[in-house]
């Protein structure tokens, strides 16, 4: 395919505004009469609220109103409706909103909120799924059986289990009976924070005409609109949601979370916009966390390395509310088979209420956690079988003709994991490993990976395309630009399809549900595939409209015409032509008569055949499009300190088609760094009472430039995706998936210690090396048989 | 109690009235509507709020009122030319592909402005040290380092915001 714009480095349209400080993020917005909210958080992670005394706070300077959850008669959520905007009779986690002060300034609101007095009766606290699942554990949601939920999902009443998903493929007992060798382990992916540099926040405004207007640093304007309309009993068209520039997302600004809280607060002061922006502490403890997952896995294989069976059990500490975590644990389950064909699988995912902040998406829905386990076990199995990690994996890769855990058949157009693996193998293993010296141990590690979009059966992305009178183009979509560069993807795909320079195409700068076309939410690495597909369709429709009008003017059949971006012309006589800009608002004859229509089009794209899981098997068309990749690294471990230094990190993904080389490199390099943070440094910690121990950047150990790999190899494979625009697939979430297993595999290579939990801090390495030196087994973590 | 403070911002003398609790960050954003300077944390860790005060890159979220009287402050809004031409460091951030979500960029630009104004020949280690005071969640720092080196080159070549 000869492409003019797709695959070229053309500067993103938002770069100048961002580099000059003129891009408008949520906290930069000032509205007339604006008030500010400060929110009280509880002293206990699980407690009954006995009383709330707001009288002193109400007397505070500048205080307009003090708000509690009293009188709130609704729950919200779009999967399992268990969320409340503000605690009503009990608190379930340490970051939960208990009460709020609305005041004339941020400072005065914060001052007054300290004066609210609350009496609590503490209840037992569970910070881990296993403890909350124990018989006799206190219930975090006493009436969970009453919650509305999507079909096929939902809590088990009388327990803390918020959902149980299972998947069956083949006969797992038979598979293990056939196995000649088994390996197993328990793997822990702790709580993390997406920790975007811009904290989450919202502005809500209940107008006197009963409409609601809301601004949020969210990627889900339409879900917010639908949920606000539902709980405040308004037509969706009377709720207007704006999304300004976003200072990063990575998952935790998806779904509807703080927006309902700020709307609840603002509903008490109609006529006034109310702004709230999370402090960093609130961003850690009062928005969504990531992960919190324990994965038990057992793999069976023949002596020749052919895999026979996989059993996975996921225990997901989803936090105090489960609405945002349910799909994370489901996807962690069915993705735990990784890039391999297992004939027999049994998989359970237990989503469990705990007294910790709710978990949501974190650069994927469970893809990192499940594949962390399988990629560690593949290395362990390879060593037992005395095979190289490449040989064992290669015998079992999902290739054309195989079926995934979900029962989906693989085609050539699904992508090629073997090519990605070969690229990484060459980059990392194509030369000798340095020999151990006085200062360092050296190691190399590898992991293969896969990711599918994460959607809902109705998830769609839409495009409005408008030709202007001069032939320039305006495109409006609902895709949230969080930094990933999707506006440039839209522009490049439109330029290619319309055959006009990207400079003639202006892409939307904000989302406004009053004007933007519907989009489910910008999640799951789906925008390039789906949004790009919608753009191609809209462009093709515009071209068809040009031809239709031109056919009337030239008095020929539409089929006889062609379009080259500047003209519509007769195929067999190109001199017979009309300039495109003369057709954009219909064609006008010299006498002023007009023909044809104004050229503006709409389109949408869904994931074809996408379905929910079959209740009998847990399988279904829940992948649709697969992206494969491989990652590997060369590391050094400093003997004196236990510090892991990443000398070289290599990534290869079969992205189908590179739309913007510079942006794809930026996505991958950034994802790798995020994965390194999770692997070596980051963990949101709680004490036994559920209190956050490190909800600040200085204590969370956020990676900085000194932690970056010394060198990154990034190379993409391009096996076209049948349904992708120009063959493209998504890449946003994938680069984090193979990082933890490849680094832990490299640590094993360097010091002979198997780690099963992250983060692997220098202290843990020193302790493991010391234990090994004293003759104890070379293992660290929960288990590994 | 309200009192006033006078200092220079981006070459203009400003007098603002204060309640007493504000740090420089709040004065810039809330009193002077200079919202290009960003807030990302609550313990002076992320560097998003960095501005240049009397020639030095400083975190405005902890810069006290007491040291502000008579100071000369430059923010991200003060870098581009009067005709809107980009500062070479801004141009380098764009050309080097450092801009993703963009929230950390003003702070990084101001850090580099402080560094290169004092030491145009800053070496790799010195640049790394300066950038280590800034968090970025998007880029993995690769493009930020490349853009910093490009900025140094643009500044030396006197490329006033023109692409090379």
Image (cartoon, rainbow, N blue to C red):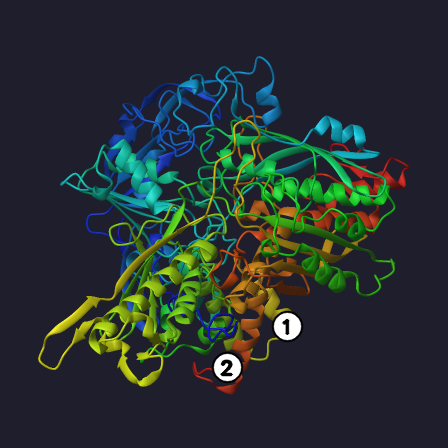
Asked whether the viewer can see residue A353, the reply is no
Q: Residue placed at 57% from the left, 12% from the top?
A: A136
At 47% from the left edge and 85% from the top edge, which residue is drawn?
B159
In-image side of A543 versus A665 (left or right): left
Residue A247 horizontal/vertical position (percent): 43, 55
> Foreground residue, A607 or A216?
A607
Name the quadrant containing residue A72: top left
Instruction: Locate residue B144: give its quadrant.
Output: bottom right
Q: Chain of mark 2?
A: B
Exactly how many numbered labels are in the figure? 2
Q: Does residue A70 show up?
A: yes
Residue A354 drawn above or below residue B76: above
Residue A35 in percent (x, y) is at 25, 44
B77 lies above or below A668: below
| Residue that carries the numbered disc 1 in the rendered image | B124
Residue highlighted by disc 2: B155
Residue A382 appears at what percent x and percent y? 82, 45
In the picture provided, is B75 more to the left or to the right than A629?
left
């Amino acid at each position: 395919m000869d492409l003019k714009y797709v695959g070229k480095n053309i500067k993103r349209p938002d770069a100048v505004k961002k580099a000059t400080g003129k891009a408008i993020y949520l906290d930069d917005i000032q509205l007339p009469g604006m008030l500010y909210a400060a929110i009280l958080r509880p002293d206990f992670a699980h407690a009954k609220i006995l009383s709330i005394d707001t009288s002193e706070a109400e007397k505070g300077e500048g205080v307009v109103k003090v708000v509690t959850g009293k009188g709130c008669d609704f729950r919200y959520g779009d999967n399992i409706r268990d969320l409340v905007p503000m605690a009503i009779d009990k608190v379930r986690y340490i970051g939960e909103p208990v009460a709020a002060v609305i005041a004339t300034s941020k400072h005065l609101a914060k001052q007054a909120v300290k004066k609210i007095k609350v009496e609590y009766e503490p209840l037992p606290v569970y910070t881990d799924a296993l403890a909350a699942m124990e018989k006799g554990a206190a219930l975090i949601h006493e009436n969970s059986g009453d919650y509305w939920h999507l079909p096929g999902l939902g809590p088990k009443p009388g327990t803390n289990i918020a959902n149980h998903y299972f998947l069956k493929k083949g006969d797992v007992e038979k598979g293990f009976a056939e196995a000649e060798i088994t390996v197993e382990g328990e793997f822990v992916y702790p709580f993390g924070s997406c920790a975007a540099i811009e904290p989450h926040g919202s502005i809500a405004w209940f107008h006197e005409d009963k409409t609601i207007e809301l601004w949020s640093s969210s990627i889900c304007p339409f879900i917010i609109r639908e949920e606000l309309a539902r709980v405040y009993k308004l037509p969706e068209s009377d709720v207007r949601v704006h999304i300004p520039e976003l200072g990063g997302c990575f998952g935790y600004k998806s779904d509807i979370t703080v927006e309902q809280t700020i709307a609840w607060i603002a509903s008490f002061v109609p006529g006034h916009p109310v702004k709230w922006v999370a402090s960093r502490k609130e961003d850690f403890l009062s928005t969504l966390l990531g992960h919190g997952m324990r994965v038990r896995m057992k793999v069976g294989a023949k002596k020749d390395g052919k895999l026979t069976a996989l059993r996975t059990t996921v225990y997901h500490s989803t936090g105090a509310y489960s609405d945002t975590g349910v799909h994370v644990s489901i996807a962690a389950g069915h993705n735990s088979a990784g890039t391999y064909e297992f004939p027999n699988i049994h998989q359970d995912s237990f989503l469990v209420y705990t007294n910790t902040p709710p978990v949501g998406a974190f650069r994927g829905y469970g893809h990192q956690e499940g594949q962390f386990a399988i990629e560690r076990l593949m290395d362990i199995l390879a060593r037992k079988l005395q095979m190289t990690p490449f040989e064992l994996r290669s015998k079992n890769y999902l290739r054309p003709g195989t079926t995934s855990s979900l029962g989906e058949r693989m085609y050539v157009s699904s992508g090629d994991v073997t090519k990605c693996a070969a690229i990484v193998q060459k980059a990392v293993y194509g030369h000798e490993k340095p020999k151990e010296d006085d200062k360092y141990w050296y190691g190399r590690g590898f992991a293969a990976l896969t990711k599918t979009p994460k959607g809902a059966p109705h998830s769609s992305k839409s495009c409005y395309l408008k030709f202007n009178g001069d032939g320039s183009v305006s495109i409006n979509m609902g895709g949230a630009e969080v930094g990933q560069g999707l506006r440039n993807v839209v522009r490049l795909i439109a330029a290619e399809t319309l055959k006009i320079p990207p400079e003639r195409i202006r892409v939307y700068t904000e989302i406004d549900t009053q004007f933007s076309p519907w989009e489910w939410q910008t999640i799951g690495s789906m925008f390039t595939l789906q949004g790009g597909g919608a753009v191609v369709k809209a462009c093709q429709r515009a071209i068809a409209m040009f031809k239709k009008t031109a056919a009337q003017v030239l008095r020929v059949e539409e089929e006889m015409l062609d379009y080259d971006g500047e003209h519509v012309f007769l195929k067999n006589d190109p001199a017979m032509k009309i300039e495109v800009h003369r057709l954009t608002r219909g064609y006008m004859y010299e006498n002023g008569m007009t023909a044809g229509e104004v050229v503006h089009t709409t389109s949408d794209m869904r994931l074809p055949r996408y379905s929910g899981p079959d209740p009998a098997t847990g399988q279904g068309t829940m992948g649709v499009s697969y992206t494969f990749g491989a990652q590997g690294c060369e590391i050094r471990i400093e003997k004196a300190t236990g510090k892991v230094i990443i000398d070289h990190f290599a990534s290869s993904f079969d992205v189908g088609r590179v739309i913007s080389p510079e942006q794809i490199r930026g996505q991958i390099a950034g994802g790798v760094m995020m994965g390194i943070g999770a692997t070596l440094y980051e963990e949101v910690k709680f004490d036994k009472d559920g209190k956050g121990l490190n909800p600040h950047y200085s204590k969370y150990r956020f990676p900085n430039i000194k932690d970056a790999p010394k060198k990154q190899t990034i190379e993409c494979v391009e096996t076209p995706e049948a349904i992708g625009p120009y063959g493209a697939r998504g890449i946003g979430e994938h680069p984090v998936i193979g990082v933890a297993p490849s680094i832990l595999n490299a640590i094993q290579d360097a010091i002979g210690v198997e780690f099963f939990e992250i983060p692997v801090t220098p202290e843990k390495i020193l302790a493991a090396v010391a234990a090994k030196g004293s003759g104890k087994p070379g293992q660290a973590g929960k288990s590994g048989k | 109690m309200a009192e006033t403070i006078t200092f220079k911002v981006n070459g203009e003398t400003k007098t603002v009235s204060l309640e007493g609790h504000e740090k420089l960050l709040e004065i810039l954003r809330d009193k002077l509507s200079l919202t290009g300077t960003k807030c990302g944390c609550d313990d002076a860790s992320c560097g998003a709020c960095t501005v240049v005060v009397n020639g030095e890159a400083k975190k405005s979220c902890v810069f006290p009122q007491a040291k502000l009287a008579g100071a000369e402050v430059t923010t991200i809004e003060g870098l581009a030319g009067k005709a809107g031409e980009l500062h070479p460091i801004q141009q380098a951030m764009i050309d080097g592909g450092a801009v993703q979500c963009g929230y950390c960029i003003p702070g990084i630009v101001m850090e580099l402005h402080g560094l290169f104004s004092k030491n145009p020949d800053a070496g790799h280690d010195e640049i790394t040290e300066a950038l280590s005071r800034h968090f970025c969640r998007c880029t993995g720092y690769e493009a930020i380092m490349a853009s910093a080196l490009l900025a140094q080159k643009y500044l030396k070549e006197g490329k006033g915001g023109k692409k090379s």
